[in-house]
Image: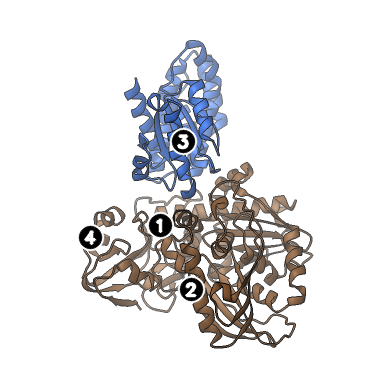
Amino acid sequence: MAEFVRLAGGRALQDQLFELGVEFPCGGASACGGCRVRLIDGEIPVTEGMRDALSEDELAAGWRLACQGQAVGTVTLDIEQWSAKILTDESKVSVEPAEGFGAVIDLGTTTLVVEVVDLETGDVVSVLTGLNPQGRHGSDVMSRIEFDLRHPGVLTALIRGALGAMVAQAAGGRLLREVLVCGNTVMHHLFCGESVEPLSHVPFASPALGARLFDGVELGWNGVGRVTLLGCAGGFVGSDLIAGLVACGMHEASAVMALMDLGTNGEIAVGNRERVVCASTAAGPAFEGGRIRMGMRAGDGAIDRVERDGCHVIGGGAAVGICGSGLVDAVAMWLDMGIVAPSGRFADAAKPRRLAGDVELSQADVRELQLAKGAIAAGLDLLRRRMGLEPDGISSIHLAGAFGNYVRVASARRIGLLPAWDVPVVAAGNSAVRGTRALLLSPSRREAILDGLLGRMEHVELAADAEFQEAFVENMLFPR
Amino acid sequence: MADLEELREAILNGDARRADSLTREAIAQGVEPLALINQSMVPAMDEAGRRFECEEYFVPELLLAARAMKAALEPLRPLLAATGARAAGKVVIGTVKGDLHDIGKNLVASLLEGGGFEVIDLGADVSPQKFIDAVTNSGANIVALSALLTVTMPSMRNTIEALKQAGLRDRVKVMVGGAPVTQQFADQIGADGYSENAPSAVALARRFAGSAA
């Protein structure tokens, strides 16, 4: 099941691999070891940086850092752990029929989704996915900010160019009357060419949160009319979350519901049609397999389910690594079996525990999960209290994104990522793209929906909240 | 005779109430405050740090131990002041300007206190001027800077620059830490030391205090 690529020597491996989807979490500074690839054939000399980041065994098994690699002649590499399915959404939403075609774009920190939509029927006529080309300059929003401050304009040009090409390809010659783009605050600012400096320090308050209008021509996007970047809520909470609220109907609901997008930057909203509180919490990338020694995205070869009698591997082949849902499953099971204590400690701390094939989890991996789930659970808890609700006052929890699609709810409850009581949990899929499409297809109500939501929305800066810090530490522990 | 071993255990287990009552008992029985610190508290926090480093303890256990240690230290403070006992060193600590994350910084502050240092904790989002004022007023010999965000790391450089310009740089050792900080970065900005985690920050401060004495 492995995915092999042959690369020519000469051109830097970093450049060639980036085009194939390998991520450079720290921006290629050889600081994180996150861009590991396995050498199958050929020669890539081991550098000092690789020795720091990888063990002798790993080097012997062919693991190298892509950011440091210089190939001597042609090499074959296994980049299986970087293949990923990007979540799209083509479900029906209500339509105010209009002539022509439009498009919606989910501008994610990691992935991009472009959908061309028939404005008459509401049908999605073509979908394209891709990786955000900014990814080679850092995988999270903070490293993008840092890069943009040092190299102004580079990321803006990159994303406008990449999306323009995708839009042209997806449109296939059709004229697009209107394009709506959703994304978090940093993606919004970088696309618009706004300064990200205010987002680089407390209180993370940018004056440029509003919606922005462009003409296709000024972006260099041929055959495209108006392009709208939807407005942000505050802090790092952007229009992707707002669109998600529209998709799950929070703006019309009388009962209080929660929407959680568990990416690298966890975004959470709790509310109903009266009031919404939202926050972002730096959960870290554990739910996407990041910072986990054998972690990977939910693609072929990833262990996505763990049970006492074995593991399930996406694609059915041999296990290559483990994705977020598999990690949650494994720890939930080990808690039940007493192999992991509620403190997070392995009964036998020294040894990593094997799951399937060569895939194992170490004590440090469990600690990463504790940090990630602690941040999310504490964030939800704090927002619920801000709404003045009892723990059972939330009527449903919607989980956006790939992790929300794959994770087993019982396991998420067992580790304390979700509340222990049986609140209904809904996998919301790519709610950002669905909500954006709903907005595209209801032009007469769009402004009222967005203004209404933004007007009722309160952004809570969690890092500034002493209560949050306390809750964060408490929630690092697993339930008994 | 109060059981110093029992006090050590109470701190290690994060039992603040028991740590407090054991300390009071020991004082009533006439145990020397310095003996309590050196034979119970310092070893307890050293052990907690050791367990953290070998991944037996995680942030919650380390914080609980630090709280228990603080509870035990409280009844000793007036006695220590009266004896004029000298701290191992004086540390001004804070999370640098622009950054609000202070769990890691709080851990370091607690462990330093447990390690016998006098700690002046300036909190989070601390401006260079506040560090300068605190060093000037307290006569501290160590400054500890924390940052959790890559984008606030430049504030560490600015703080060190400001200490230079205020003519204080030679009077203090500057140590830096936090998730994105590396030894390389510490060298670049002219810090005297870097530590990867809270327990090793205490070891580093001890080295500085030793060299300053």
Residue to which mark 1 is pinned = A26
What crowding class fits label 1: few (fewer than 14 Cα within 10 Å), some (14-19), or many (20 or more)? many
Decide which of tag 2 and tag 4 comes sooner along the chain.
4
Separation of disc 2 and disc 4 at Cα?
33 Å
Residue to which mark 3 is pinned = B159
Residue to which mark 2 is pinned = A162
Q: Are marks 4 and 3 on the same chain?
A: no
Separation of disc 1 and disc 3 at Cα?
25 Å
Decide which of tag 4 and tag 1 comes sooner along the chain.
1
- The relative height of residue A230 versus residue A462 in the rendered view (above or below) is below
Secondary structure beneath label 3: helix
Name the residue at 42% across, 76% down. Answer: A300
| Residue sitting at the far front | A218
* Chain of the residue on which disc 3 is drawn: B
Secondary structure beneath label 1: loop
The nearer-to-camera label among 4 and 3 is: 3
Name the residue at 73% across, 81% down. Answer: A94
Separation of disc 2 and disc 3 at Cα?
40 Å
Residue A208 as seen in the image, left or right of residue A22: right
| Residue sitting at the far top | B83
Separation of disc 4 and disc 1 at Cα?
19 Å
Q: Are marks 1 and 3 on the same chain?
A: no
Residue A405, x across and y down, in percent: 56, 71
Q: Tag 3: residue type?
A: Thr
- The relative height of residue A245 versus residue B142 in the rendered view (above or below) is below
* Chain of the residue on which disc 2 is drawn: A
Residue to which mark 4 is pinned = A46
Secondary structure beneath label 2: helix
Q: Are marks 2 and 3 on the same chain?
A: no
